[in-house]
Amino acid sequence: MRKLYKFIAMLLALIMVFALVGCQKTAPTNESSLFKPGTYTGEADGIHGKVQVEVTVDENKILEVKVVKHDETPGVSDSAITNIPKDIVEYQTLAVDTVAGASVTSNAIIVAVGQALEKAGANLADLQKKPEKSSSSGETIEKQADIIIIGGGGAGLAAAVSAHQNGAKVIVIEKMPSVGGNTIISGSAYNAADPVRQGKQGIEDSVEKHYTQTYEGGDKLGKPELIRTLTENAYPTLQWLEGLGMQFKDEVFTVLGGLWPRAHKPVKPLGTGYIETYMNYIEANKSDIEVMVDTKATEIIMENGKAVGVKAEANNNDVILKANKGVIIAAGGFGANVEMRDLYNEKWPSLTNIKTTNHVGATGDGMVMAEKIGANLIGMENIQLLPMGDPVTGSLSGNIEQGVENRIFVNKEGNRFVDEGERRDVMTSALFEQQDTFMWVIVDKHSYPTGDTKNNFNETIDQLVEQGRAFKADTLEDLAKQIGVNPENLKKSVEEFNKAVEKGGSDAFGRTLFKDKIDTAPYYAGARVPTVHHTMGGIEINANAQVLDKNGNIIPGLYAAGEVTGGIHGSNRLGGNALADINVFGKIAGESAAKAK
Ligand code: ADP
């Protein structure tokens, strides 16, 4: 709730700033001028704290807007941080469009600039005129390349790079204002049986074990051929990424619902490392790879049963993109499309009011377009929820767990209720049975040796406590009081967990993944609820990422990769398998399409 209040408070502040300055204008030095020349500062609340700006004006013009300090999520807020200042200067107004998917950050910048301009003596009411954009000329833009890729998330960009490495010229279209999709905001763990890192940590693993856990973890509903391809290529593709400059940490870990310590964590926060790596390559080869943002694919163009291009829209212009060799659909899942979720959901209670970890562009467009031209969709009913959503936004940010072994979940009574190393669907089903479908994650100093230790989302534990998104105490009693659970129950839950850590083997819930006891202050608690995370169903492909029709035949010229595809994860995706999936199959799709005759 706190964040919602904060957001409402910020909007009120925005309205008040505009209302107030309408009546109490500070006159600039010269009556006919708009501003008192100089550089002014302003600040407002973003998602993760203050956003500070510096605004330079002369008598009549906003010359420059700079965001000088912020703690917004890297990648996700980038387009707001770049575009809002640019638009304010270009159109000389505060009534600029907020950036989809980064509206809180956008509004914070607008409010902060308003504050700075007020100091410069501006009449903010005069700065509320909507700009007239002349971008929609209504013409048809036509382009051609060997390969057209729909979607600039991890799978689409992997495909673009590998297609280019195999000699193709590529156009990637992305409907949002910036690339990244769900990939850039993901927890970013990448599963691979890794002889080097796991060897050093003494962890026994193999491609076979990864295969078996993936197949069985999805209730044997995944296609064996695709799971083989995924697990056999996971490590070579990770090495390919490293060859492109991507850095992973030395230690592997067990990610939530990953069932085994084979998750690789990028050095850069969230999924920014993958996107930056691919975009660096693309930037270096931009004469051959074009990325068109704000361009939404609407239709696959077919000729004699073959995919030969894509129809799209950009700023109300029609766009026709012709493909010499093939079209790759990499448009992601439908986790943010409530109607589609409700249409396909069979397993969960209604998902209408469940929030999502997904970015707003995850609306299933790729599946809808593919089905229209005869592609087979499989496993659409398999929708993955995580028990790890922020109660206000549904996002994974604010999650205080650092791997599976060192944390427990307790309900509102302070009792444990599930094996916290279980499959994601099992943990989430158990959470639905708890009061208010709500739980607390409990950790201690082992997870946060210092207050500036960061979680997976680049947030320090001190920041989370300060923002009221985590609670901190020197004793379990005090922690229980702060979060309103029964102290005796919480102490007993932790004591029994600690005994199980000592004993090893399997505890009363069947948990086998343990490392440290929860016995060292400070203790921390963070609230979590179920959230829609991943849609496992989608377009059916073969091991070459070629799209199949309803009779199992290849649709010539058409490829798909990433969350838009189905048939890999079955009924339940292992944590850490999505990043492996999108990179492995993105790379394969690019290669296959580039090598097509
Ligand atoms: P994956 O992990 O499979 O790459 P992502 O969610 O990371 O999936 O990326 C999918 C990308 O596709 C997102 O950036 C999304 O905005 C984009 N996208 C979705 N629908 C369309 C569309 N109709 N046209 C262009 N891009 C699209």
Image: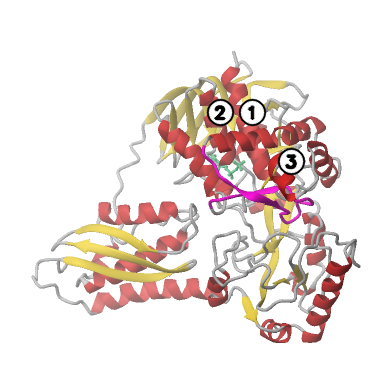
Mark number for residue 340? none
415 left or right of 72 in image:
right
Can the viewer see residue 353 in this picture? Answer: no
Query: Reading the chain from its start, which is encountered first: label 3 or label 1?
Result: 3
Q: Quadrant of residue 45?
A: bottom left
Q: Nearer the viewer, mark 3 or mark 2?
A: 3
Local packing at callout 2 (Cα closer than 10 Å; few below 14, some 14-19, many 20+) is many
Cβ of mark 3 under 8 A from ligand 1: no
Reading the image, the residue beneath label 1 is 588
Tag 1: amino acid:
Ile
Magenta-highlighted residues: 245-268
215 left or right of 157 in image:
right
Query: Where residue 341 sits in the image (x, y, percent)?
Result: 69, 51
17 above or below 110? below
Q: Is residue 251 magenta?
A: yes
Q: Is residue 542 magenta?
A: no
Quadrant of ligand 1 in image? top right
